[in-house]
Amino acid sequence: MIGQTELVDRVKEYDPKFDETLINRAYDFSKRAHGSQTRDSGALYFSHPLEVADILTNYRLDGASIVTALLHDTLEDTDTTETDIRDNFGDEIAQLVDGVTKLTRLELQSNKAKQAENFRKFVLATSRDIRVLLVKLADRLHNMRTIRHVDKPERRRRIARETMDIYAPLAARIGMHDIKDELEDLAFAELNPDARDSILRRLTFLREEGGNLVERIIAELNQVMADEGIEAVVSGREKSSYSIWRKMQRQQVEFEQLSDIMAFRIVVDDVLDCYRILGIIHGRYSAVPGRFRDYLSTPKPNGYQSLHTGVLGPEKHRIEVQIRTHKMHDIAERGVAAHWRYSDIGSGPVSSTGMADGKQYRWLQELLDILDDAAGPEDFLEHTKLEMFSDQVFGFSPKGEVYALPRGSTPIDFAYAVHTEVGDHCVGAKINGRNMPLRTQLQNGDQVEILTSENQTPSPNWEQLVVTGKARARIRRVLRHQQLEQYAVLGRSIIEKAFQRHDETLDEDKLAGVLGEFHADSVEDLYALVGQGVHTGRAVMRILFPDKDGDGTRSTGGSIFSLRRTRRNSTKASEHSVPISGLIPGMAVHLAKCCYPLPGDRIVGVTTTGKGVTVHTIDCMTLEAFAESPERWVEVSWDVDDEDAAKQVSRLNVTLVNEPGSLGELANIIAQAGGNISNLKFTNRNPDFFDMTVDIEVDNNKHLNDVMTALRAGRSVSSVDRARS
Ligand code: MN
């Protein structure tokens, strides 16, 4: 284990400006705070923060990070308070320690939902100061290196799972591949020891069988470089057991078929040499198709640069060759921690304090940009395997806020999660920058921008589109309210007309006096009850003007008389003879004058304030205008037998050939088919054809079809269609 003096010396070497007494104080402070606490291994607890600090010196992290590493468990595991840290080490250190502590607390939550909830805070917290994440990764690395000391198998598994799902991808994301590889391998050993063992056994066998194959290939590649006069460092290794395992899974192949389990690296000084070497390798060995990648001209999002190719190399072994410069190599292995070395300023420690002058730590800003949003969240979440929270999806607002929603959630759920107002006025959504329907189910990492309009209110079909309770409850409430409002408007106009029939004008004071009779709480409430059909306008009038009958004339016969009158009215007035059922009593019904529905047609009613219900055929074009207001649609059906139905008028659009006798033929065909033309109107004439609408009285839609079929057979009839709008 590293000693105090050695630690201080190491940091001094690369961060000479840092106050070394701070490191010494942190060392003593942490040692005292952890006191006699021990780890699962039996070692003194203090050995852990010290090892974490040691790991971080390898990445030449600044003094503040090293101090943070030493103190990282004091808040969680000892009596130390944040104030203690602040008083002793200042604001910067206090914030860093606090950040690491928060992440540690997240790990302690066993509940999956909570983990998911907190994971986003995790990301946000780390993006505030990358050093928090770096300390956390070193902490996790040391814990994984010592995980064998943890007694409970399920606890070991949980930690390993979390490492595999969250920390290894995070390390990869910020380019720290050596930490990623080690974390993966340690977690793999815990999660799938059998698979790992068999891969290791197989590797050992190959090694024995092939002799020192890796060395022989390195030697040959070195010779090739020497022949070409290129100064290069060649190295080679077997791939890690976990990456071999992943490859076997991904490609669905047996180990025997996996030939390229060896990777070789050629590292040079100059970028141009990289391409030169690529040419030499491809000239010398046959390239495996589809394996060439140029991350040199197109770096990965985390800044990784290298040329990759696969060849049938020395002794016909299939190998992977990576070609890069020393600088690229360092960044590939050490990620963000390596960037500073190549910054304009030259050497200096990794810290975020240089953010202010912009240039020096531009890498840090770039990394934050990656973590922040842009192509970030989607990519980021994809890599962090959030499938572990398979019952949830995470959506990002354009500002980068994360919302955890149940799987199956739609943009409407998202909108209500953001704010009730946003939900209520939601008219559309852009998902990952594209306009998408509101029914679209959100995917993990989707960036969701909700489009709103002041005039929009929740639509009844939204209820089918949401899965969150919050959204559903709110939508129902609003709809109920809207419906009552509409009933009230309808009821008011019914009552207003009733007043007019009595030669009176609407008088709300009078109505307020009779509310009790109708069990209404307010005049508005009474309107709604009348609009809903619970009470009729006539009933209200009877209470208000008991000495007048329903038509405003004096009533002598009381209720029997008015009932009789009502009946007579209903058979006389054409509006009331519409044989439609499925409506609330007292509602006026009209057959639409656009599609002329006939008994037998599939129909639907549309309510219109003050006018009652208009009935359309289901395929009427006019209905499109009401597509956005399904709350106005009512289900209706024909209330007649085909036999004794009264004749109904329907309308046809007919095109006739313009020739003598064609109109006569039309009239003849219709008469023979039992129809009766009630009206006929030309809509367009030209030398060859004329278009007209023909209104015909028929029994029902079947009868009309017969008429139409007969017309189509007519010599001078060019086309026949039912009016649809
Ligand atoms: Mn720790």
Image (cartoon, helix red, strand yellow):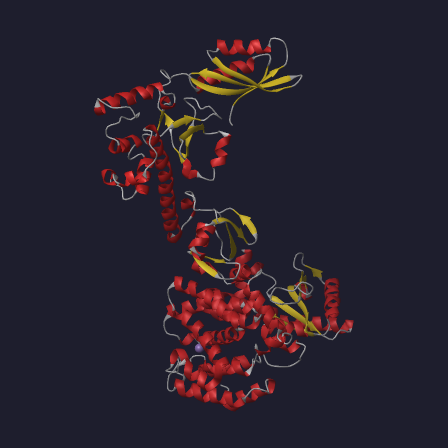
Q: Is residue 114 above or below residue 31?
A: above
438 and 54: which is toward the camera: 438
Residue 174 visible, this angle: yes
The residue lying toward the viewer, choosing from 310 and 110, is: 110
Which of the pair 380/424 is nearer the observer?
Answer: 424
Ligand 1 appears in which quadrant? Answer: bottom left
Can you tell which quarter of the image residue 375 is in? Answer: bottom right
Occupied quadrant, residue 515:
top left
Residue at 46% x, 53% y is 422
Vertical arrangement, residue 258 with respect to residue 76, above or below: above
Residue drawn at x 67%, y 58% as measured from the top left: 288
Taking the image as shown, residue 534 lies to the left or right of residue 418, namely left
Instruction: Give the percent coordinates (x, y) of residue 502.
Output: 32, 29
281 or 623, nearer to the observer:
623
Q: Position of residue 702 (x, y in %)?
A: 44, 18
Q: Position of residue 637 (x, y in %)?
A: 37, 27
| Left or right position of 98 against 267 | left
Q: Indicate left or right for 447 with 476 as reference.
A: right
Evaluate whether residue 52 shows in this view: no
Asked if residue 437 is positioned above or below residue 153 in the image, the reply reads: above
